[in-house]
Image (cartoon, grey):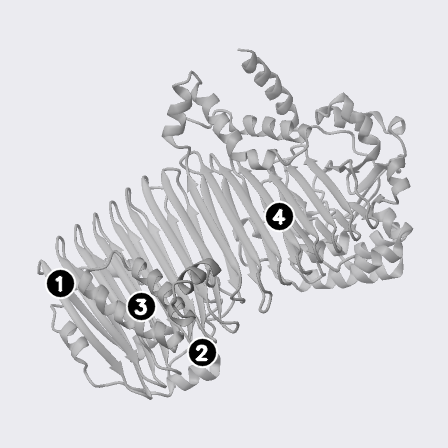
Amino acid sequence: MAIEIKNYPTNKSEDWRYFNLKPEKVKEVLSFNEFDNETVFFKKLAEKIEHKKYSQFFNEIDYQKDFFKNLIIEKGRFEKVVFEEKENSINEYFILDSGKTLSRQVDITVKPDCKTVLTIFFKPLENSFLNLLFNFLVMENAELRLNIILDGEENSLLFFRTNHKLLENAKSSVFLLQLADSFTRIETMANLENGAEFNRYQTNILNNSSFTDTLFKAFHYGEKSKSEINNLSIVQDKAKSILNGLLFIDEKAKNTKAFQSARNIILSEESYSVSYPQLEILNPDVECSHGTSMHSFEDSQLFYLKSRGIDEKEAKAMILNGYIDFFYKNMDNKIKKYFLDFCHRKIKELM
Amino acid sequence: MADNKNNNELKSISEEYKYGFKTEEKYKFKSDKGLTEEIVRAISEFKKEPEWMLEFRLKAYRAFKKMPMPWWGNTELLATVDFDNIHYYIKPEKDHEKSWDDVPEEIKETFDKLGIPEVERKFLAGVTAQYESEVVYHSIKKEFEKLGIVFLDMDSAVKEYPELVKKYFGTVIPIHDNKFAALNSAVWSGGSFIYVPKGVKVETPLQAYFRINAQNMGQFERTLIIADEGSDVHYIEGCSAPVYSSDSLHAAVVEVIALKGARIRYSTIQNWSNNVYNLVTKRAVAYENATVEWVDGNIGAKFTMKYPAIFLKGEGAHAEVLSVALAGEGQHQDSGAKAFHLAPNTTSRIVSKSISKGTGRASYRGWIKVNKGMKNCKSDVKCDALIFGDKARSDTYPRMEVYEPTTKLTHEATVSKIQEDQLFYLMSRGLSEDEASTMIINGFFEPFTKELPMEYAVEFNRLVSLEMEGSIG
């Protein structure tokens, strides 16, 4: 292969500590054929007007020059999209065939005062490699809602990176549901200007040998900016969930509020969970906190349900569904229902 | 106001304490700057150590040469450590002293300046004082001897209790643990050795004072505490150092072993001068039903890297860490705690409190790990931070790894400045802003101070109020 493996994930860098692909795996995924059929989803995006004048913003947030980015540069494709209407909405379902690979970068701009809702379902099938980079520029007073479901099959590799640049009073909300059996790395970066708001809700419901490594970083550069980052992981069988998060509050970012939480529910002896929620705060005018918990089922909760005639499996499913329903409380009702259907089905599979 | 007068008096005492003192430097032996195999051999020879200790030192020296600096933490400050510009061993002129009357006047003055109350001095007969890299006087209280407690400086322990030392030395923190532990293992000098026999409960806390008193001198004390089955001991170390113009490196290693049912509490108040690099490795092993408590206060030093750790190796063991840090102008306090649950039914609790002000930076770095198959472990971590001043910084880096489903782990952290409503409440009752803030800060640190013996708590509060002077509002 012509591609040079630069900045390949190693354990020297904290960000890559858990995501350490074996060289054999890299060779394997690089040998897959390129996915060359134009999909409806990417075509739809490509039809939007291309805009170069925002490139400075994208350069600011798209700074990672690692193996996955190089793969896009050398073999993948770029799309540039601008959403200009007051209300924009895209719902898509994307399947990557077995034995295929796809590398794609999409730079999306949401113009001032516009609202865009993107709901995308990604399903890489067995033995495939999906490498995606979404850069979002959300301009003044604009809003982006991103609803993502990842459902990769076993033996697939999924790399999903999103970078957000939020200008004054912009708002971005990301709802992510990770059900994949694959080896998955999810990265989210957000860069917040004055009054910007970033919310992120990620649920991992994992079983079999699924491995999910999540990294997020929210950089607060503007005053009165807000971020709320919540994670819920349920791991069963031999699944592994890793969470590495950082809230960074710059000295200019006065009156900032930032919060992150992580709940990890470990259901089997072979599964495990790692959390690394970090704070770096450079000014005193902040309200910042984080909380993490790792546990299985509370005996008292199970007892309560069982004493009402509910069998154990059902009781456990009820408790987990309860966590998830509450977790997605800030979602649009229609999409929430769609998300929850997936969750409930997956929970049933876990029990 | 009477309180104000008291405050001023306390402040004036603290000021002297803060700015340190220095006595004439007289040496029997002073190694050249930099570290070579010859220096390591010379140290061992000078101390007339057994062969195994020389081997240990040489092995550590070779490991030190090969090992990289930590790639995490404040790498900029770490990069400024110049290993070639340090005297690795200095032997003071005075030999070991046996009783308080024999203690040289200048050392008595030192204790005077530390503000030790008159009553306390009576107990100083049981104190190990570290002067330069060496213990200059050392006496053991008769009661301790009667109970079979061994409380010695480490050098004497190697000679007097070779079997005991050999059995445990370097077992908790191996040579290859990290670069600074390797360095310490190669050039260690001084420190305390404590052995508490089975079932013995030590009523009086054992104390040691440490001092760096020579320019460009690294201090590498080595402490080993062994509490035999069912015993109970409290060890206190306090540090102070005069201010010098060039940087001083302090890389201690502390190994603590609590055997079945034992309890060890290790309290530290660290107040090195603001040019010291305090890069310490502290670790404990707790066996069945044992308890280890680290009570750790970091106020001084330019740069601290200290994460007291506990390996919970026996069923029912308990770990407790109470860590506070105050990062003033130009300081970086990178402290935290680690608890590794390596046996079932083990519990840990970590409370960390930090204040950063001026250009200070306080970082909490923690690590909780529960191994596979270690049923019913519980861990609770709480970090609170207060920030003052536009240039101050506060970081939290907690890592939690759970490989066992029956674990219950919680972690929470908060960072903020003093809340306006709290200030308003106190000020509306007639307190000035400074008084109100000091009261809130003392309350913030209270979980720590209440665990200290009275005189240490008083000293700690003095230091905090002095450090915080003028930084509010």
- Is B279 situated left or right of B368 in this image? right
**Is residue A105 at all visible to an observer of this figure?**
yes
Q: Chain of mark 4?
A: B
Residue in the image at 71% along x and 51% along y:
B253
Q: CA distance from mark 3 to mark 1?
A: 24 Å
Is label 1 in a helix, a strand or a loop?
strand
| Residue A151 locus on image (x, y percent) | 31, 76
Residue in the image at 47% along x and 37% along y:
B359
Labels 1 and 4 touching (C-beta < 8 A): no
Observer-nearest of B137 and B206: B206
- Which residue is tagged 3? A177
Is label 2 in a helix, a strand or a loop?
loop
Mark 3 and mark 2 lie on one chain; the one further toward the N terminus is: 3
Q: Chain of mark 3?
A: A
Categorize mark 1 by other alpha carbons within 10 Å: few (<14), some (14-19), many (20+).
many
Q: Amino acid at mark 2?
A: Ser
| Residue B304 locus on image (x, y percent) | 59, 45
Observer-nearest of A310 and A83: A310
| Residue B16 locus on image (x, y percent) | 65, 24
Nearer the camera: disc 1 or disc 2: 2
Is label 3 in a helix, a strand or a loop?
strand
Residue B320 tag number: 4
Q: Are marks 3 and 1 on the same chain?
A: yes
Labels 3 and 4 touching (C-beta < 8 A): no
Q: CA distance from mark 3 to mark 2?
A: 17 Å
- Which residue is tagged 2? A209
Q: Amino acid at mark 1?
A: Phe
Q: CA distance from mark 1 to mark 2?
A: 39 Å
Q: Chain of mark 1?
A: A
Nearer the camera: disc 3 or disc 1: 3
Labels 3 and 1 touching (C-beta < 8 A): no
